[in-house]
Amino acid sequence: MRILVFKPDEIGDFILACGCIRLLAAEHGEENLILVVKSEIAPLAVREFPRARTIALPLKERRRGVNKDAVNIYHCFPAWLRLCVTRVDAAICLRSMRDYVQTALFLSPCTRRRVACENLLARANRVRRRAVEKWIQRLFRPAILPYPGPRPGVPAELEANRLVAAELLGRDVADAEVMPRFASATWQGGDFWLLCPFSSSWTKDYDTGNWAAALREVADLIPAGGIRLAGGPAQSSQLAEFGAALRAAGIGCQVAVEAPAPLEAFPDLAAKAAAVLTVDTAAAHVACALGAPAVVVACGMHAGCYGPYSPNGRQVWIVGDWAGLGHRRWQESVKPGDVAAAIRRVAA
């Protein structure tokens, strides 16, 4: 059975879906999977699922004064042609917020069976969006499942993946079967802590002073290799400033900034860390997929959607009160002492 998995999402979202994809690979053979992902995610997808076929979509983000749909139609045209001549037994979509271009790409492969959760963009008061979704259901007759809410230990995105897999496989799927996990790397541990302090949005970042205060409280636990800072290639200067701020705040251990590396190499670095300290970003999901001890300071903006969860109990999520305090003030609900206590817990 050939299955097309449509997941044109960000890094953390793809890692969240790895468990579901691995389940389908186990059931029907990895060589029978076709993964449709964003171009920047493709190297990681190839690393994790080397026997699957990967189709990369060069999707662009919204820019002021530019029609995003027109730009993406232009850039994705070659990939769309490949999708149009692709025949599969089933196609599933693991992205729940689909714009018009992504919807068209998902519907392009030749198949009689399509499974997806409802498009959350159609929930908004958008008459045209709802009309398009109704037209799609009449013409293509996909199996559209209601988007679920979270359950304890199972955020909504993982639950959505579980429901889609259960519908496709025709059986009940346990939570453990869709928990993120890597096959190409597993946690080994090492003599340093890996600290990834930055996300894609500054509103989700935890204050440098708070990190420093928490680390001072657990100075006796910091491994001999000290603390290594890591992030995306565009964050190198921020990481250097962050490291200097930690040292100025009295962190006496070695604080080093990791050289920029390709995305697909990051799991190897995280696997060698004694623990991963991070915010709600891709590093949190990498740690979970590796089974590495981790402390995740999450702002709570999407609480229950992408976290918290812990595949093996080694990951501690501290969720801020975004709903009550919002914006930058959510940090007031996450004290450095809370972070220090979580670090002591995972270090044990």
Image (spheres, rainbow, N blue to C red):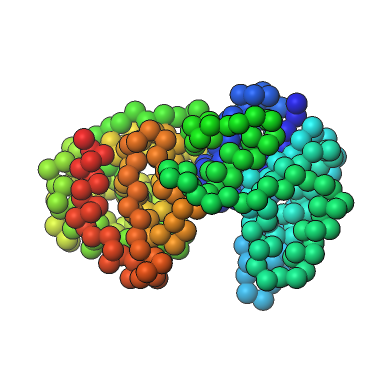
Examine the rendered structure and indicate whether residue 127 appears above or below residue 283.
below
Q: Which of 62 and 25 is in front in this view?
A: 25
In the displayed structure image, the side of residue 137 where residue 177 appears, left or right: left
Q: Compare residues 222 and 74 and report the one nearer the observer.
A: 222
Q: Image check: 157 left or right of 311?
A: right
Examine the rendered structure and indicate whether residue 341 appears above or below residue 29.
Answer: below
Q: Position of residue 166 (x, y in %)?
A: 64, 35
Identity of the residue furthest to the right in this view:
139
Image position, residue 232 (x, y; %): 45, 52
Dividing the picture into quarters, in which one does residue 97 lie?
A: bottom right
Vertical relation: 7 (above or below) 335: above
On-image quarter of the N terminus:
top right
Which quadrant is home to the C terminus? top left
Position of residue 250 in the picture relative to residue 210 (left or right): left
Q: Residue at x 60, y 31 (%)?
A: 172
Residue 346 visible in the picture: yes
Query: Picture coordinates of residue 215 (x, y %)?
Result: 19, 51
Expressed as whole percent of the image width and height from the top left, the position of residue 261 reads: 45, 44
- Give the left or right position of residue 317, taking residue 48 as reference: left
Residue at the image point whose x is 70% and y is 34% from the top: 168
Q: Quadrant of residue 62?
A: bottom right
Residue 261 in view here: no
Q: Nearer the viewer, residue 105 or 190?
A: 105
Residue at 27% from the left image edge and 42% from the top image edge = 193
The image shows a total of numbered marks equal to 0
